[in-house]
Amino acid sequence: MGKLAQMCYPATVMVDEDRALIVVSGGDTLLDQATQTYLAGMAPNTRRAYGSRLGAFFKWRAAQGAHTPLVAQLKEYVSYLQESGRGPRSVQAHLNTIKGLLRIAAALEPSLAAGLPQLELVKAPPVRGEVQGRRLTRQQALTLLQAPGDDTVKGLRDSAILGLLLVLGLRRSEICTLTWGHVAELEGHKVIANLKGKHGRVRTLKLPVWLWRLIAAWGEQARLEMNNPSARVFLPMSKGGSVVRARADKGITPHAIYKLVNYYTARLSLPSVKPHDLRRTAALLARRGGASIEQVQLMLGHASPQTTSNYIGESLNLDDNAVDYSPLSL
């Protein structure tokens, strides 16, 4: 928190006599406490992203020098982000992060609550038809899934990881923290039980039998502590193909999964995708296969079905589009 604290907290929040939220210099205790509360429990990558957005805002605000009402400052900041070339989704993410911090600050200091409704006056630019990220086709996803093979220990591990990304849509952080205690049986089905995801949301996911067998084969071939519920499922491996047991308590890292995906997609000359794009691919393929938006939402652990719809890209379905229903042609 040290560097982040120095970057983010040249200010504190107050309510003036007109009940307008303002940010003034000095007295950083409240924002320090609010930010620690806000970021607590987030996955490392999420924490870095949120911290970066907060730091960018306070750095910009410090350069303005004026103690204008916060709503006016936020509107100016939205304009600044747009002029800097950021897209609607990026501006939306920055604004929502700042609003989230201010709501936490108001929860810690009730006198600020009177000014919170004013935050609704600041709107991010609407997102209209913008497709976020990339998605692989069914054949591309299958080619990627088959790439590692199952004739080596590393192949088993990598296939299982790609399966969790492409079929269950797990986040990298969720794969890294997966333990053998999560792999369970429920109502006659193999599942990943009580998986804690983003914002503390907990979900239980059905494991396809083939994927469960792949994970089990990896554990057996790698001689892992499969009977230990707190032991990590996925461990790092050396370049020589041996399991790095010295890191058994920490497991594989998110960056290692990033490199894994990059290696196989490059080797197969597939489109350059990130692990999160495979999560979008899982959502798209499940939806195209007949799953409802609600089912996909539960699988991904989203709070809003709109977020799930954005992942799928339903607003721009080129295989089943409105123009396909027009009776006109030449």
Image: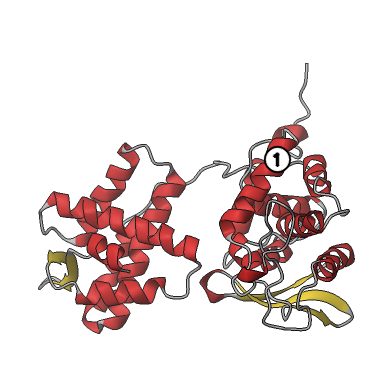
Q: Quadrant of residue 219?
A: bottom right
Q: Is residue 3 visible?
A: yes
**Model colouring:** secondary structure
125, 176: nearer the viewer: 176
Q: In which quarter of the image is residue 231?
A: bottom right
Residue drawn at x 17%, y 63% is 10
Which x, y percent locates residue 88?
Answer: 43, 45
Which x, y percent locates residue 296?
Answer: 71, 62
* Residue wearing tag 1: 265
Residue 304 falls left or right of residue 91: right
Residue drawn at x 67%, y 56% is 238
Residue 70 falls left or right of residue 85: left
Looking at the image, which residue sits at the far top?
Answer: 330
Residue 84 falls left or right of residue 149: left
85, 246: nearer the viewer: 246
Which x, y percent locates residue 99?
Answer: 34, 64
Residue drawn at x 77%, y 45% is 144
Task: Using a 10 Å C-alpha cutoff, classify the residue at mark 1 as few (fewer than 14 neighbours), some (14 to 19) or many (20 or more).
Answer: many
Q: Quadrant of the N terminus?
A: bottom left
Which x, y percent locates residue 224?
Answer: 76, 73
92, 65: nearer the viewer: 65
Residue 298 falls left or right of residue 76: right
Numbered disc 1: secondary structure = helix
Report the amino acid beneath label 1: Thr
**Number of labelled discs?**
1
Residue drawn at x 67%, y 73% is 232
Residue 298 to residue 314: above or below? below
Q: Can residue 277 be seen in this view?
A: no
Q: Quadrant of the C terminus?
A: top right
Q: In which quarter of the image is residue 19?
A: bottom left
